[in-house]
Image (spheres, helix red, strand yellow):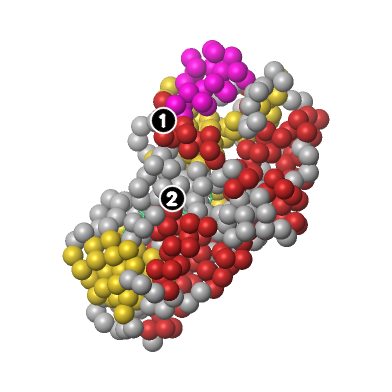
């Protein structure tokens, strides 16, 4: 192995996982990160609003088996592992629902996920769904948020590769802050964008804004949308072919709109999620309820709806969420709002979307692409996790396992 050892492109959860694996094995490595911060889609914003909030990942999904829970404990991150008695509330047909209405809503959501998880069909998700009746706008929304894009653009069997354990713990101190803390002491250079990776039989030349670097092996962790759009050029070969094929495993669109409030409305103070079904709209508007000294309501919006809003800018995104808020609570709710903010993953040139999914017909391609050996230029990241795709812990585990493979190749 030459002096540079392994070059890891990107300091998100996958790049940090790969770096930790290299460090644990005593293998020389350098992480090159184009942004001026580490974390990628794991980012806890601490300025602008009275309370820190996660722009990207927030829940430790599959928390009972999630390897990042151990990191959270080690680094003193706080999370909530117990669900509240009544986590959901729904506003529909001009009213908040009673317990019976909420139970019917939950049943519709559960039936939809069960249908997706058991269908085994590589077809658009709506093709396998039972009729959700009046809860259809909420089912569409939740599926869109979980898949990161409109359900019709997502393969049902591709989605079902995800091994959900139904334990989802919010990181109260910030998931982004946790991932950033994990990177402490690692050899990471920020503000260095990789432009080209030229592979040879004994390694690769990595062309960056800050000059060329020689590596024995390269692990690329940029998002599938960044790679499929050619932001990093690869010399002809298996890695170049794989990067091109990633347009069939794209990142969808999913953004958040944050409302900081002086107090939560009573109707939702004891719940954690509100789904607002407005008449004439085929997709509900969702709010995550964050109680505490500096309460917040975060609207989560996915798919084509948010692509159009993100292109129009933050005011359009805030307006969309505000319309749902005022319809459910009345215009006076805005008197309680003391700050607003939005995310911008869809337009961020270093991410260009939310997280990945196989398009209908591409479920097997996704599995094959993860198993593929591309030699000394390999790929890691949430999209390369066989059973934890789309998540931070999946990205981390993928980074570690690809670094392990690379270490074996180079030894
Ligand atoms: C709105 C939203 C909500 C989410 N919620 C959750 C959740 O609750 N729980 C969960 O587990 N997951 C969640 N996720 C998904 C999770 O955040 C991601 O799956 C995970 O963080 C991806 O990590 P990664 O390392 O694969 O990619 P990234 O985090 O995208 O890291 C790739 C890095 O590569 C860098 N890069 C790009 N191009 C270059 C280049 N040319 N040169 C050098 N560096 C480059 C980028 O700047 C970035 O830092 C959410 C994501 C979003 C967007």
Q: Does 303 sit above or below residue 276?
A: below
Main SS type for the magenta part? Answer: helix
Query: Which residue is more in the foreground, 56 or 48?
Result: 56
The segment highlighted magenta reads 316-337
Q: CA distance from mark 2 to mark 1?
A: 24 Å
Q: As drawn, is 207 to the left or to the right of 81?
A: left
Q: Residue at point 54% right, 13% down? A: 331
Callout 2: CB less than 8 Å from ligand 1: yes
Query: Which residue is more in the foreground, 108 or 374?
Result: 374
Disc 1 designates what residue?
312
Badge 2 or badge 1: first in the primary sequence:
2
Q: Does 130 sit above or below residue 24?
A: above
Disc 2 crowd rating (10 Å Cα; few below 14, some 14-19, many 20+) is many
Residue 321 among magenta residues: yes
Q: Does 119 sit above or below residue 374?
A: above
Residue 23 among magenta residues: no
Q: As drawn, is 254 to the left or to the right of 276?
A: left
Question: Where in the figure is residue 197, as x and y percent of width and height?
Answer: 31, 69
Question: Where in the figure is residue 105, as x and y percent of width and height?
Answer: 75, 35
Disc 1 crowd rating (10 Å Cα; few below 14, some 14-19, many 20+) is few
């Amino acid at each position: 192995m030459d002096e540079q050892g392994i070059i890891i492109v990107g300091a998100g959860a996958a790049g940090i996982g790969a770096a930790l694996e290299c460090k644990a094995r005593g293998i020389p490595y350098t992480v090159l990160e184009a942004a001026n911060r580490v974390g990628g889609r794991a980012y806890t914003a601490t300025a602008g609003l009275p309370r820190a909030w996660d722009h990207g990942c927030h829940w430790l999904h599959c928390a009972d088996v999630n390897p990042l829970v151990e990191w959270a404990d080690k680094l003193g991150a706080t999370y909530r592992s117990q669900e509240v008695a009544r986590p959901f509330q729904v506003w529909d047909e001009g009213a908040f629902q009673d317990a019976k209405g909420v139970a019917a809503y939950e049943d519709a959501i559960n039936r939809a996920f069960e249908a997706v998880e058991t269908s085994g069909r590589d077809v658009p998700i709506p093709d396998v769904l039972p009729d959700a009746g009046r809860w259809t706008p909420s089912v569409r929304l939740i599926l869109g948020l979980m898949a990161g894009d409109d359900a019709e653009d997502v393969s049902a069997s591709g989605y079902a590769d995800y091994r959900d354990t139904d334990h989802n713990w919010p990181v109260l101190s910030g998931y982004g802050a946790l991932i950033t803390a994990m990177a402490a002491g690692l050899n990471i250079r920020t503000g260095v964008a990789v432009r080209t990776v030229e592979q040879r039989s004994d390694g690769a030349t990595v062309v960056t804004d800050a000059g060329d670097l020689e590596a024995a092996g390269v692990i690329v962790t940029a998002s599938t949308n960044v790679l499929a759009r050619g932001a990093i050029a690869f010399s002809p070969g298996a890695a170049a072919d794989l990067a091109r094929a990633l347009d069939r495993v794209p990142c969808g669109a999913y953004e958040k709109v944050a409302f900081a409030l002086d107090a939560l409305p009573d109707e939702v103070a004891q719940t954690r999620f509100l789904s607002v079904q407005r008449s004439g709209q085929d997709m509900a508007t969702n709010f995550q309820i964050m109680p505490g000294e500096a309460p917040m309501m975060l609207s989560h919006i996915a798919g084509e709806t948010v692509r159009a809003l993100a292109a129009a800018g933050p005011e359009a995104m805030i307006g969309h969420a505000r319309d749902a808020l005022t319809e459910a609570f009345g215009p006076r709710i805005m008197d309680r709002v003391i700050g607003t903010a939005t995310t911008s993953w869809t337009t961020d040139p270093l991410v260009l979307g939310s997280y990945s999914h196989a398009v209908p017909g591409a479920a097997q391609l996704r599995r094959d692409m993860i198993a593929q050996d591309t030699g000394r230029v390999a790929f890691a990241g949430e999209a390369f996790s066989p059973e934890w795709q789309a998540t931070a812990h999946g990205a981390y585990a993928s980074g570690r396992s690809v670094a392990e493979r690379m270490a074996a190749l180079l030894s």
